[in-house]
Image (cartoon, grey):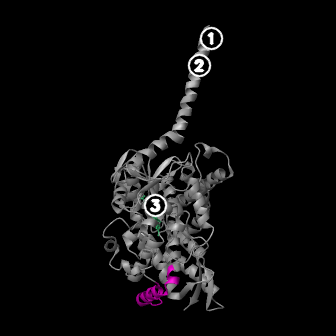
Amino acid sequence: MEITTVSCVVGVASISIFLYFIWRILNWLWFKPKKIEKFLNDQGLKGTPYKILYGDLKEMVQMMNEAKSKPMTLTHDIAPRASPFFHKSLTTLGKTCFTWVGTRPLVHISEPAMIREVLVNYNTYQKPRGGNPLTKLLVRGLVDLEGEQWVKHRKIINPAFHMEKLKHMIPAFYVSCSEMIGKWDKLLTQESSCEVDVWPYLQTFSSDVISRTAFGSSFKEGRKIFELQREQARLVMKAINSVYIPGTRFLPTQDNKRMKEINQQVKGSIKSIINKRVVAMKAGDASHDDLLGILLDSNYKEIKQKGNSNFGLSIDDVIEECKLFYFAGQETTGNMLVWTMILLAQHSEWQTRAREEVLHIFGDKKPDIDGLTHLKVINIIFNEVLRLYSPVASFRRLIHDESKLGNFTLPAGTLIQINVLIVHHDKDMWGEDANEFNPQRFSEGVSKVTKGQAAYLPFGGGPRICIGQNFAILEAKMALAMILQRFSFELSPSYSHAPHAMPTLQPQFGAHLILHKH
Ligand code: HEM
């Protein structure tokens, strides 16, 4: 009798637990997203209807693949190809609307006042969490931290990007660019002009710059790290574009195994560079001019000042920051340069103006820091390139608690997306010629043209603005000045216009230009 009662109780308890889990799964998969959908709709916010588990992921990937399948006509109206799903959603649902990333709502904001609110209040609007934890193998460090940890890291890393430190990186920019130009010179030994896909050269250039500026004399080891990080980025992008089922990262799939293997190798290599450097520092024999040297110095000062190593970065922290320099600084700057060359190849009048400025300031001499900071025409050209072909097409934030944004109340767990590329092409903001290449619009500075609004965001904004923007601009100025001193260029007939945002904005089929030697 007693045994029967016990079995009954166990049976009822098991059924209850089972039903509870079923309820939780159904709530996660269906009831909660539908409740949120109604909550947002009731506030007048339009959105795509929620689709179970995937949300809009399938349509997003399908539209991206379709856009990728063919090049576009040679215009700068690139958002429909580069961000097809978001462009369509914002066009049909309104500039403030919502879509779905799996079971999470993704609210798109485009009004400058709302954008500013999100960027300034960085403790409320945080970097997204969740999704596939394997992505953390690629991006951690400053870009991924919050609260006090972020403040601490930003303070220690900041000195590495001060102008007086960046000055010491000019020789590294010069050497890397000379190597690239040397290769182009070789291609042109027989002929006075030839067709070159400049994209792979610019990628190698910008990764070489990071290897040299991050690790100084150890830059060859840096190059190997970079190759591994590139492979990691491909695997991570694959993971991000699929729905993450919790726990699957532990499955011994080929991709999972490779991602972990790469992580070990990269960490091991950076650790060995750091260890060598720490030994050299103790012997008073280390370079203090590269990013690693400046970071270790700054860290040492912080620990000394506060009298406790808890206030500084650990070796693991330093490893993550070095990995981040590659991830954040290489592809973005390479993209900025490739689009600059493509646009100047198309708009020869601006190419001529830029060359005249370079020859006026430097003649055929090595560009120096003073001259580079005085390049005005090149400055407005870069502003316009970064507007039309912003390397970071969009970025996201996550709210952990219910929050008010503008007139809307957003539930906890909502993702927010700022579609930089779409904002940069908005005719209401930039005028009827929003899709034209017109660097002149920046002739009186960025704030004049945006009327001080948060509408120009190639480097983000607020306290979490890109820490490397001066580095990137200086590097790009050196490269463009040296290129213009030696070559003129135009689009090759084989160039196919295909801007593609995966993850940063790239020319999908390369950048085939005809180079002419001066
Ligand atoms: C043209 C080149 C570049 C572009 C367009 C660019 C763009 C951006 C953007 C849009 C953000 C903000 C992302 C967000 O708010 O979610 C950002 C952050 C960041 N960037 Fe860059 N970046 C460039 C070059 C660099 C370089 C050269 C480095 C370093 C070597 C770098 C390091 C970082 C870091 C560490 C952050 C995170 C800052 C923080 O959260 O405090 N970037 N970048």
Q: Secondary structure at mark 3?
A: helix
Q: Total label count?
A: 3
- Residue 208: in sight, yes or no? yes
Tag shown at residue 501: none
Q: Nearer the viewer, mark 3 or mark 1?
A: 3
Which is the main secondary structure of the residues drawn in magenta? Answer: helix
Residue 346 covered by magenta stretch: yes
- The boundaries of the magenta stretch are 343-366
* Residue at the (52%, 71%) spot, across then down: 335
Which label's residue is closer to the chain start, 1 or 2? Answer: 1
The image quadrant that residue 374 belongs to is bottom left
Q: Amino acid at mark 2?
A: Val
Q: Amino acid at mark 3?
A: Leu
Which label's residue is closer to the chain start, 2 or 3? Answer: 2
Which residue bears the numbered disc 3? 90
Which residue bears the numbered disc 1? 3
Quadrant of the rendering where the N terminus is positioned = top right
Decide: is 296 above or below 357: above
